[in-house]
Amino acid sequence: MKLTFLGAGDMFSFKQGHNSVLLEFDNTNLVIDFPESNCQQLFKLGKALTDIEHVFITHLHEDHINGLQLLGNYFRVYAKRKPVLIFAEELYEELWQTLRAGMEPSMTGPKTLEDYFDVRMAGKAFTIGHTTFELVQTHHVPGMSSHGIVADPYFYFTGDTSLDRGFLTSLPDRIQTIFHECHLQNDTLKSHTSLAELLSLPENIRKKLVLMHYHDLYADDQARFELEQKTGLRIAGPQSIFTF
Ligand SMILES: [Zn+2]
Ligand SMILES: [Zn+2]
């Protein structure tokens, strides 16, 4: 399995793409979250939007879904198939309400989410090819459904979350890498995870961490390198590649 960062920036990132990764495995692919910035990043990788086969949505903040309307429309114009769109079942209504104004009206009558996407609502897990992805409820904003995913034994990808020390310490040893969101700022944003919190984790967990979803100050390679030297933690770059 190959994981490529399409962007590692937070909601207010302008220098690099918003946080999203492309997974390539079992002769197919899965993109986790679909910000509009993915379009340019995929182009840079020599991929067409119509190469995308599956998309998983972690939650409904704008920086994680603002490319979906474009993706759905692009497929309708340029492809003979629909991309598979996967999300926790409770997100269905709110996701459609978010997209509806731009997607329901059409030249051939009202459209539904299913006209654009092969919708797959996930309960506890979903399987693509030989790989199962387990949903993990995260603690992001009260009242908002948000999920990370575990691809056992390869990785846990948190999506947006405040620190869940209990879950991280309960992960089996065999999970190789933890892609964890971190704003990398000194201030504390209660809906996200701070660097100080991650540095307080036991060493066996710190060694697995790769930080993502951070401030534009660290879009610069040198700034990330210096912080990695100072903290001993790895930080994903905008086009970092990990293989499992
Ligand atoms: Zn976010
Ligand atoms: Zn968020």
Image: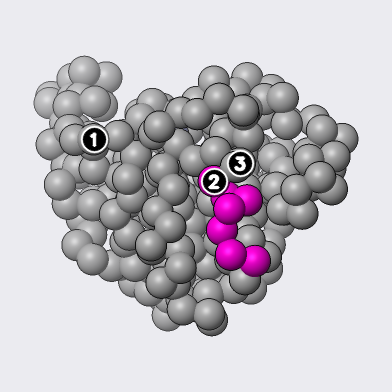
The C terminus - image quarter = bottom right
Query: Which label is found at residue 142?
Result: 1
The amino acid type of the residue labelled 3 equals Leu
210 up-or-down from 192: above or below: below
Identify the residue position indicated by label 2 in the image.
197
Q: Which secondary structure lies at badge 3?
A: helix
| Picture residue at 53% right of the left edge, 75% below the top | 175
**Residue 104 at what x, y percent from top left?**
18, 25
User: Which region is colored magenta?
Assistant: 197-203
Kindly report the distance in space between the C-alpha atoms of the residues bearing marks 2 and 3: 5 Å
Q: How many marks?
A: 3
At x 87%, y 35%, the residue is 222
Q: Nearest the camera: 100 or 82?
A: 100
Where residue 42 is drawn, which disc sits there? none
Q: Nearer the viewer, mark 2 or mark 1?
A: 2
Left or right of residue 34: residue 237: right
The answer to whether marks 2 and 3 mark residues whose Cβ atoms lie closer than 8 Å is yes
Nearest the camera: 199 or 158? Answer: 199
Residue shown at 77%/54% (left/top)? 232
| Magenta stretch holds residue 119 | no
Q: Which residue is mark 3?
A: 195
- Which badge, 2 or 1, comes first in the chain's sequence? 1
